[in-house]
Amino acid sequence: MTITLQDLKPAEGSTHKTKRVGRGRSSGHGKTSCRGHNGEGQRSGRSSKRGFEGGQMPGYRQMPKLKGFKIINQLKYQEINVGRLDQLGIKEVSIETLKEMRKAHPATVGLRVLGNGEVKSAMTVKASYVTPSAKEKIEAAGGKVELV
């Protein structure tokens, strides 16, 4: 048996007869045609505006207004001071190694090295940005700085 478009019909119980209003009292939908007595809703051409709550102060006006703005798709960098790098005690510092050690957030894409603190051991630093004072301290301790 093949099914054609003529054979298709809605599922049992999914459709209802349309409400025929204003067709006399015996229909059950006569006189006021299911609109009630008087008031705005009974008049023809009435349509409520989006967000209208019947004269009550609408929810969108009750809420406080947002201040400022948020930058979406902003690249996140992990900032770390050279003193902290020295405390970690690793020879090669990059964002990947910091993520493995769980010292950097997984969502960060780069490393920014700042110059606060002292460096005693030599290390190789691979970072997106290094401040001039941090670069000076790392190289003075016998390390290298590579910008990625």
Image: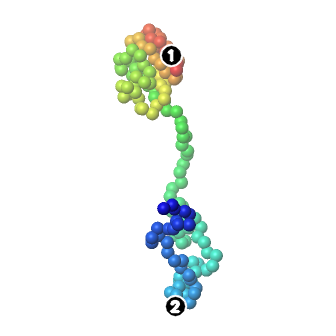
Q: Is residue 140 above or below residue 73?
A: above
- Please report the residue visible at 49 percent of the width from the left and 25 percent of the height from the top: 112
Report which residue position mark 1 lands on.
146
Q: Amino acid at mark 2?
A: Ser
- Expressed as whole percent of the image width and height from the top left, the position of residue 46 reads 61, 75
| Near-viewer residue (64 or 37) | 37
| Near-viewer residue (4 or 78) | 4
Of marks 1 and 2, the one in the foreground: 2
Secondary structure, mark 2, is helix
Distance between the Cα atoms at labels 1 and 2? 90 Å
| Near-viewer residue (90 or 138) | 90
Q: Is residue 40 visible?
A: yes
- Expressed as whole percent of the image width and height from the top left, the position of residue 45 reads 64, 76
Q: How is this picture coloured?
A: rainbow
- Please report the residue visible at 54 percent of the width from the left and 72 percent of the height from the top: 54
Horizontal arrangement in the rendering, residue 112 relative to residue 40 (left or right): left
Q: Amino acid at mark 1?
A: Glu
Query: In terms of image quadrants, where is residue 31?
Result: bottom right
Horizontal arrangement in the rendering, residue 51 relative to residue 90 (left or right): right
Report which residue position mark 2 lands on.
26
Q: Earlier in the sequence, mark 1 or mark 2?
A: 2
